[in-house]
Image (cartoon, coloured by chain):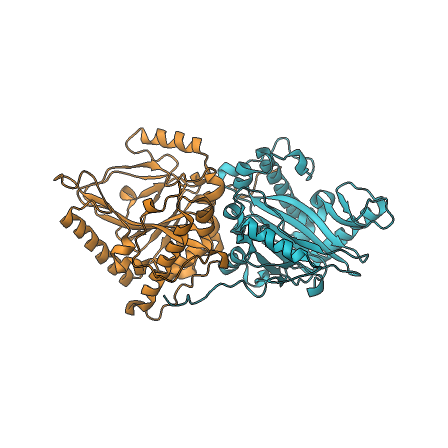
Chain colours: A orange, B cyan
Amino acid sequence: MTDTPAPSRPSPAVPECHIRKTGLLPEHITAFRREGVLAVRGLLTPAELEAAQEAAAGLIDDAWRTRSPHDTIWTLEPDDPDAAPVRIEYVMDKSPVLARLAGHPLLLGAMESLVGPNFIPTWDSMVFKTTAGAPRLAWHRDGQMYRDAVAVTGGGRVIDVGVYLDPAPEDNCVWAIPQSNYWDDERITETADRMNATEWDTTGAVPAVMEPGDALFHNILTLHGAPAVVGKQRRVVYYEYRPGEVERQLGPHTPEYVGLKQQVLRSCLEQRAAAEEHRGEEPFAYRPAEQYRLWDESPAISGLRFPHEEYWRW
Amino acid sequence: MTDTPAPSRPSPAVPECHIRKTGLLPEHITAFRREGVLAVRGLLTPAELEAAQEAAAGLIDDAWRTRSPHDTIWTLEPDDPDAAPVRIEYVMDKSPVLARLAGHPLLLGAMESLVGPNFIPTWDSMVFKTTAGAPRLAWHRDGQMYRDAVAVTGGGRVIDVGVYLDPAPEDNCVWAIPQSNYWDDERITETADRMNATEWDTTGAVPAVMEPGDALFHNILTLHGAPAVVGKQRRVVYYEYRPGEVERQLGPHTPEYVGLKQQVLRSCLEQRAAAEEHRGEEPFAYRPAEQYRLWDESPAISGLRFPHEEYWRW
């Protein structure tokens, strides 16, 4: 046999989609599924970006002011004078702007195409670096949740979306190893251990350079990391999505969780539809299969915070 | 909460894609994943259709002439005078035309978009009705292969493609129950048992009316059946596709099988590229992730027939 015409060595760069120019095309879907990562350029309008930046700044200011450990991860115990907050959980519940952002029609349309029609939101958080500095983020996979993780999610149906509110240049961005979403556990462990044995090794990885308003989609099985950085602010809002049928049957949350998070998604859509600034926008229509319309409208949910630990199945 | 703007009751018709006019769009991908079925109109050119019809007729004539049980399913024992052949296995190996058809760029592009970049061909066969008549095809799911079938394949990553060589009007076509690909085993069994208790019950089902040259994609978990028919010929070439990572990790075939069937696919592509009648066509470029380039080029395969029973893992 002759050589295959188009071998698929891992891509030397993160595949890109300029979503407002072309929409999410089948080739973007395939590239994401193959490479495990996709840069979506210009997801937010300038006005959306500005509103999200302001909301993010408010949440970070609250963390500094209250020094509360509630839903907030600190580098040290919060009462340590050198402690800095680095992550806030359940941001949709804490900020109406970030709830409305979670109803973004281009974002949700892409999730429907990639995750499938029964997608649900699972995690929502903000991860940020303050000018005080941030340590290296070790090479890791976000999830190892199923016994046959590669078979179930290797193809890209559990997705972490990072919406960037600040620039992430090459010396301060996430690096990812294309196609590592298909690696078995042994290769992942061996590679991560080797790369993490030095301060910053990027062998086989590509930088996900991002501009404010861009979003990085990554398969939760894709191996990724980030270098240490000092003196730079960088805020990223993360939303994670999973297929309702996978969550319902395999967990890790309880079956009840699927319907509750569908109510969260519906609430975000309603809040966005009711907002003056999104008037005239074509809203996303959430249309899971009938078997996966699992929300209970009565009683309506009273907030958007459903702590994971109250819904673990295993 | 108000009603969701676009509820998703199962579709009253099979969703359609006119593939030569629009390509396979993200909305077709989502519709297939939601409904579990998609009619792809006009996949074959008139010349491709004519060649496939001729090849199919030749295979059926061979069956009648030899009355061999080899790779052929008969309604009765083949030496019974009333016996009729109804299905022939491994048609790519038996007919160069059907091998080249399996290299069809529009078909394979669609499979890459739906199944993912590591897709492999699994089953290939021809199912046909002769004018002697064919009994009702009972309501069934093609596959129940994984412990959590809905989670693994409900979203449409294991696909049966039927390429129609004859018309399939409403009284002689496959009927499918949209969204039944998401039903759990209990609902499938209860529904199939109830519907199969009468000669022909189409409650909740839609007819997949097909013209020659069309292809019907169905999720192997979608519940489907067909009415009894007399006096009509209908030939359908079936190709099934699965994600290489699912087959490799979960089976049902052995891990070795994945690479062998990738060689089959590559051979089909090479045979098509070498054929005068497909000159000038943009060939499909098979580009699985590096981890799933599992074929061994030396020795090259000597045929396209890899009997399932020699490669079962369970």
Is residue A106 among what the camera can see? yes
Q: Residue at x 79, y 56 (%)?
A: B130
Looking at the picture, how far across and down is residue A72, in whole percent? 23, 46
Looking at the picture, how far across and down is residue A161, in whole percent? 36, 50
Say which quarter of the image contains residue A198: top left
Q: Is B55 situated left or right of B203 in this image?
A: right
The residue lying toward the viewer, choosing from B296 and A109, is: A109
The total of numbered circles placed on residues is 0
Q: Quadrant of the N terminus of chain B?
A: bottom left
Work out which residue is located at the far right of the displayed protein and give it.
B81
Looking at the picture, how far across and down is residue B286, in whole percent? 55, 45
Residue B274 to residue A140: above or below: below
Is residue A16 among what the camera can see? no
Q: Residue at x 38, y 66 (%)?
A: A283
Q: Is B97 situated left or right of A288 in this image?
A: right
The residue lying toward the viewer, choosing from B131 and B47, is: B131
